[in-house]
Amino acid sequence: MPGLLFGTAGAPRSTVNGSTVGGIERIAELGLGCMEVEFVRGVRMGEVGARLVAEAAARKGVRLSAHAPYFINLNSHEPEKIKASQGRILQAARIARLCHAESVVFHPAFYLGDPTGEVYRTTRKYLEEVLSQLKQENNRVRLRPEITGKSSQFGTIDEILSLSAELEGVAPCIDFAHWHARTGNSNTYPEFTSILDQVRERLGRAALDDMHIHVSGIHYGQKGELNHLDLVESDFRYDEFLKALKDYGVKGMVICESPNLEQDTRLLQETYDRL
C-alpha cells in the first residue's frame, strides 16, 4: 500500500477540457496522486467512458475513488425513494468498478425526525441489501459512507464506524471538515488524533493504512455545514490536521473539496511533505 496521496474532488479547475480523463492527466502534471470522480449530480458516464478513465489512471499512475449522487436517503419514509437511493449507489459502484476506482463515497441518510437508533437500523438494513447485490455481481468496490456536516444528516463518527465494523465491504470516509462544522470544535491536534484513535480502536490498524479522507475549509453555523471555503479563508487548522496524519502514519487518499481545488490540494501536500 503506497503512502498518503493527495488529490482533488473532481477534475482540477485548470483541466483544459474539464473531462475526467483530462482531470487525471492534469493531476499527474500537478504532481498529485489521486482523484475522486464526482457523480454527485448523477452517474452520467457509460461503460466506454469508464474504461477510458481506467486506462488513463493506469497510464498516469493516479489512484481513483468515486462519489455517488447526493440524492440518497436510505431512511426515506417513501419506499420508492429508498429503492431509487439503492439504485444510485449500485449504479455508481458499477461504473466505479469499470473506472478501476477503489471505493464509492456517499451520504447515507437523513434523520427526518426519527429516533437515531431506528435510523441506524434502517440505514444498515438497506445498505446491507446493496452490498448483497454487489457481492452477487462480484463487485469488490468498497462503499464508504461519509461523516456528514449537518445535524439533520445521518453520519456521526460513531454511526459511520459502526456501519464499517458491522458490514463487510464498508469502510469510512472521514470528512474532517464536516465533523468540525457539525461539532463546532474538533479542530485541534488532540481532537484530530482522537478521531484517528477511534478509527484504530473500532476497525484496527489496517483502517489507518487505507483511509479515505475529505477535507476543505468550511463555513458553518449552529446546524452545521453551510458551504466549503478555501483553507486560508477558514478557521480549519490544516497544519495540525496534517501533523496528526503524519504522526499516526496514515495511508490512503486525502481528497480536497475546497473551491480552489488544486491550489489547496497542493498546499496540503506541500505542508505535509515539510512536516
Image: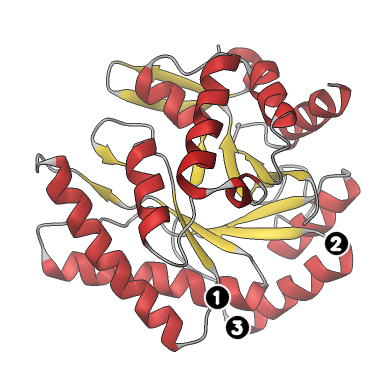
| Mark 3, residue position | 47
Q: Residue at x 63, y 78 (%)?
A: 98
Real-space CA distance between mark 2 and mark 3, rounded to the nearest whole angstrom: 21 Å
Q: Residues within 10 Å of mark 2 (few under 14, many from 20)?
A: some
- If the image is split into quadrants, where does the N terminus sit? bottom right
Vertical arrangement, residue 245 with respect to residue 108, above or below:
above
First along the sequence among labels 2 and 1:
2
Vertical arrangement, residue 13 with respect to residue 51, above or below:
above
Name the secondary structure under disc 3. helix
Q: Residue at x 87, y 43 (%)?
A: 30
Task: Pick the residue in front: 102 or 39.
Answer: 102
Residue 255 in percent (x, y) is at 64, 42
Residue 235 in percent (x, y) is at 55, 11
Q: Which mark is residue 230?
A: none
Instruction: Place residue 85 in its image quadrant.
Output: bottom left
First along the sequence among labels 1 and 3:
3
Residue 108 in percent (x, y) is at 33, 53
Task: Pick the residue in front: 217 or 11.
Answer: 217
Q: Residue at x 26, y 60 (%)?
A: 124
Instruction: Place residue 69 in its image quadrant.
Output: bottom left
| Mark 1, residue position | 140
Q: Residues within 10 Å of mark 3 (few under 14, many from 20)?
A: some
Q: Residue at x 36, y 59 (%)?
A: 166
Task: Pick the residue in front: 45 or 237.
Answer: 237
The amino acid type, in three-letter code, at marker 1 is Arg
Q: Which mark is residue 61?
A: 2
Vertical arrangement, residue 155 with respect to residue 219, above or below:
below
